[in-house]
Image (cartoon, helix red, strand yellow):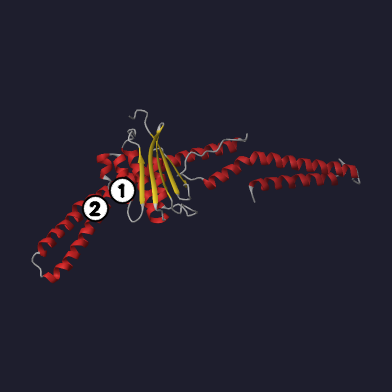
């Protein structure tokens, strides 16, 4: 039973008992009770109950809003706060405390998420470096050795040896591709525009065509914001390529006023009603780190539409 009905029924019971005592007592009413007196007392009881219900409903309405907010709050969609309503000091203090708790939780989550994502990027760079330096060099040495041995084997074995060489070469290419995804060196060396063009080219395989429209006069966003834009684009393209069944993907990066807008849309199946996975939650967490706004929706034709709005500094070029 809700708090409203508990308080209301308690008050109703008290008032009903009080009215019954008044009706039964020989001091305040006639004996036997006259019909007009019973009607008047019953009407008074009804009026008191209605007034009590209205006052309780108005007074406890902020608690109902607080309960709904507590059930639906999501720290990955920050900013929603309850307005302090009602004159009851206890309820107002409760809402103030709840809003302060949300402020603290969002700040703590942003700080911990930032540390986790930076540690993740450091680990990605370390793994990419080891793949390039250790595994990549080992496979390169294997290829050179296979090439040297190829001139000393019988002709009937050379065909099999060439297959081994081709498999090793493909493995080396795959290792390099994984290393590039883990550590986008092109982002640090050539900038965001070139990195996104390279990313679009990389995903344009197997019947999937990725078109890109990227402004060339983007402001100086800084390393953190550029990395967020790159990772969100990478995750959106990965989701579209793996799960949507899309044939065409559009990647747009535009400057609009005091912000940079990234939009990735496809002609696939869209998000549907599937719950958000770790990839989408990761995009939301990255967006929060730089104060960006991420929105997911449906593109024209029913495909997925991912939009990221990143604020840029006033002093950008």
Residue 176 disc label: 2
Q: x%, y% of residue 47?
A: 78, 40
Let me know if residue 112 appears in the view.
no
User: Could you say whether the residue bearing mark 1 is in a helix, strand or loop?
Assistant: helix
Q: x%, y% of residue 232?
A: 37, 45
- At x 14% / y 67%, what residue is drawn? 158
- Is 145 on the left-hand or right-hand side of 130? left
Residue closer to the observer: 198 or 213: 213
Compared to residue 22, the image places residue 84 above or below, namely above
- At x 71% / y 48%, what residue is drawn? 9
- Is 57 on the left-hand or right-hand side of 280? right
User: Could you say whether the residue bearing mark 2 is in a helix, strand or loop?
Assistant: helix
Residue found at the very far bottom of the displayed protein: 156
Q: x%, y% of residue 188?
A: 26, 40
- At x 38% / y 37%, what residue is drawn? 254
Residue closer to the observer: 235 or 240: 240
Where does label 1 land, which residue? 201
Q: x%, y% of residue 305?
A: 44, 46
């Amino acid at each position: 039973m809700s708090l409203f009905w508990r308080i209301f029924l308690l008050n109703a019971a008290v008032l009903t008992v009080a009215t019954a005592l008044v009706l039964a007592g020989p001091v305040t009413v006639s004996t036997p009770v006259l019909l007009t007196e019973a009607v008047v007392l019953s009407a008074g009881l009804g009026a008191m109950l209605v007034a009590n219900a209205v006052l309780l409903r108005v007074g406890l309405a902020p608690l109902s809003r607080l309960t709904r907010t507590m059930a639906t709050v999501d720290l990955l969609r920050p900013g929603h706060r309850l307005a302090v309503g009602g004159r009851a000091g206890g309820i107002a203090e409760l809402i103030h405390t709840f809003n302060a708790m949300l402020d603290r939780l969002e700040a703590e989550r942003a700080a911990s998420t930032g540390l986790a994502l930076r540690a993740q990027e450091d680990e990605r760079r370390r793994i990419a470096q080891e793949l390039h330096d250790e595994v990549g060099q080992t496979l390169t040495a294997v290829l050179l050795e296979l090439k040297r041995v190829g001139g000393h084997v019988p002709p009937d074995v050379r065909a099999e040896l060439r297959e081994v060489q081709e498999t090793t070469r493909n493995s080396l290419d795959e290792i390099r591709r994984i290393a590039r995804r883990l550590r986008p060196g092109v982002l640090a060396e050539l900038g965001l525009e070139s990195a996104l063009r390279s990313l679009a080219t990389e995903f344009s395989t197997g019947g999937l065509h990725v078109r890109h429209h990227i402004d060339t006069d983007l402001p100086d966003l800084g390393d953190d914001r550029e990395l967020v834009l790159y990772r969100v684009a990478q995750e959106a393209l990965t989701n579209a390529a793996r799960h949507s069944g899309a044939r065409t993907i559009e990647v747009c990066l535009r400057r609009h006023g005091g912000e940079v807008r990234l939009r990735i849309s496809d002609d696939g199946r869209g998000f549907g009603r599937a719950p958000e996975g770790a990839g989408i939650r990761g995009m939301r967490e990255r967006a929060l780190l730089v104060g960006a706004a991420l929105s997911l929706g449906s593109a024209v034709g029913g495909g997925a539409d991912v939009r990221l709005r990143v604020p840029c500094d006033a002093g950008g070029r």
